[in-house]
Amino acid sequence: MVREPLVKQSLIGRASQIRRYLFIRFVEKLRLLAVAFVLALLPLAYASAQTVPLAFKHGDRIVWLGDSITAAYTYGRYIETFFLLRRPDLDLTFINAGIGGHTAWDGLNRLDRDVLVHRPTVVVINFGMNDAAYPPNSPHAAFVKNIQTIIARLREGGVKRIIWVEPSPANIAGVASPSKLIDRQNQLERLVSAMQAQAVEADVLKVHWQQPLKKALALTESSPDIKLIPDRIHPSALGHALMAVEFLRQTGANLAPAVVQSTVSETNVETQFLPAGVGENKPIKFQTAVARGKSITVDVGMALPPVPFVLSQTQIKSVASAELDALRSLVWRVSGLEGRARFNVTVDGLTIGRFSGDELARGVDVMRDADTRPSLSPQARKDLEACSLKTGYAFVNDYECLFDMIVKRDLLQAATRGDRVRDLPDFAAIGHSAYLTFMQSWMDASNAAIDARAVLIRKTPHVLSITRAQ
C-alpha cells in the first residue's frame, strides 16, 4: 500500500519527461521549418529589395569619365570584377577614361578622343573634386552646365544610358579654419546640392555617395589604423570599396549574400542556393547521396560567389557596411545534424574549423578567417599566381586573379591614351597608327583572357565538406 503512490509518482514523472522531450522535438522541428521557410523567401526578399532595374544590359560597353579618383580605377575594378564573377552572362566591356586633375570642362573637351571613340553604350561621369577648386568666373566652375553639355553630346554620339556620379568628399577632419580644403568641401556640397536639384531624363541615373562616405569618415576619424581618405582628397582602397558597393546598390546590382542551405536526412543531402548569372533570382535545388557516418560534400561552384572587395572584418566593421560584409561572406547552413555533435568543415580541402550541429544549423561563414591568409607578394601578384594557386581560400584566389588581370590590362590601356602618345618624338602618322593598332590588339587579347578566366572560374567546382569529428 505504501508503494502505490511512489509508482504513480514515478509514472507521472516519466510521462512528464516524455511530454517535455516531445515538446522539445516539436520546437526543434518548428525552428528547422522556420529556417527553411526564411531561406526559401530569401531570393524573393532580395528581389523585392531591388527597386532599381539593373543599369547594364548584355554586351554593354561602359566608359568611366572622370578625374584622378576615376583614373585610379580602384572602384571601377571592384565593380568590373563583381560583374565578371556574378554576372558573366552580361559580357560587359569596361574602359577607363579618367585623367588626374580634370574637371567636367576638361572632360567635355576630350569626349571625342577619349570616350566616343570607344563606341560606348553607357558612360559613367564622375567629376567635381577639381571643379570645386576653381573660382566662380572660371569655365571649370560651371559644373552643372558642363555636365549637361556632356550629357547632350553623349546622346548625340549614340550613348544609350548615362550614370552621373556625385563627387566624393574631401577629408576635413582636424583641419583648422580658414582653409582652402574646407572651402573646397563647402563648394563640393554646393555642387552636390545643385546636382540633386537638377532634373534629368529617363536615360540618366544619378548615383549618390557623398553622404555614405562622410558617415564612414566620421566613424573612422579617431582610428589610428584606418584612413578612408589618407591624403584628404583621394580615397583609400577601403574608400573605393564603399564607393563600389554604393554604385552597385544604386544601379540595381544584386548584392544578395552568398548563402548555401543544406538539409541532411538519412540517405541524402538537399541543397539550394542562388546561382550566378542570368538566373540569379531563382534558387537552384539538388540532392546528393550521403552514407551514414561518411562525409557530406556539396559542390557550390555555380552559387553566387563571395566578392571580397575587403577581406578584413575589422575594416568592414569600422565603416559599418552591411553590403561589404555580405559580399565578403559565404554562409553555409546545414540542418538535420545532431545538435551537440562536432563536425569538421572544409572548403576545397582547406580546413575552416570545427562546429557543432547547432552552429551549422544557424550558419557558418566559411570565409570567416580568409583575411588571415598570407598575402601574395607584389611579384606574385604581377605574375598572376592567384590564377594558378591550388590551395588557400579558392574564392579569394578567384577574386584576386581577375582583379590583377584587370590591373595589367589597364596598364596597357593607359599607354594608349591620347595625351600619352600624341607628342612622342619621331612618331609619324603611320607609326602612330601602327602603334595604336598593335596596343589595341593587345588589349583585346587581354580582355579575351579575362573573360575566359571568368568562364573557367564559373566552371571550376568548389566543394564544401563536413565530416564528423572524432
Image (tube, helix red, strand yellow):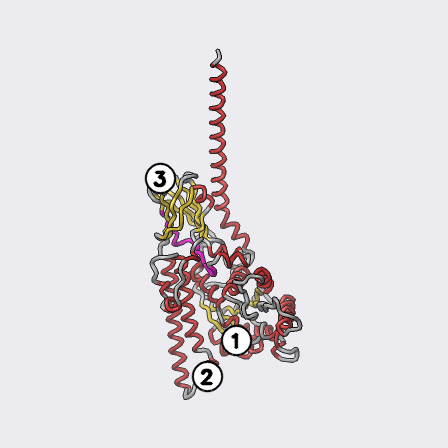
Q: Is residue 58 above or below residue 443?
A: above
At 49% across and 50% down in the image, what residue appears? 43
Do the residues bearing badges 2 and 1 touch, measured as CB atoms within 8 Å? Answer: no
Q: Secondary structure at mark 3?
A: loop
**How many neighbours does mark 1 have within 10 angstroms: few (below 14), some (14-19), or many (20 or more)?**
few
Q: Position of residue 463 (x, y in %)?
A: 36, 51
Q: Amino acid at mark 3?
A: Thr
Alpha carbon separation for disc pair 2 and 1: 18 Å
Alpha carbon separation for disc pair 2 and 3: 69 Å
In magenta segment, residue 140: no
Q: Which mark is residue 100?
A: 1
The range drawn in magenta is 297-310
Residue 208 placement: quadrant: bottom right
Residue on which the image places disc 3: 267
Main SS, magenta residues:
loop
Residue on which the image places disc 2: 422
Closer-to-camera residue (409/237): 237
Q: Is residue 342 above or below residue 13?
A: below
Residue 455 placement: quadrant: bottom left
Residue 242 appears left or right of 414: right
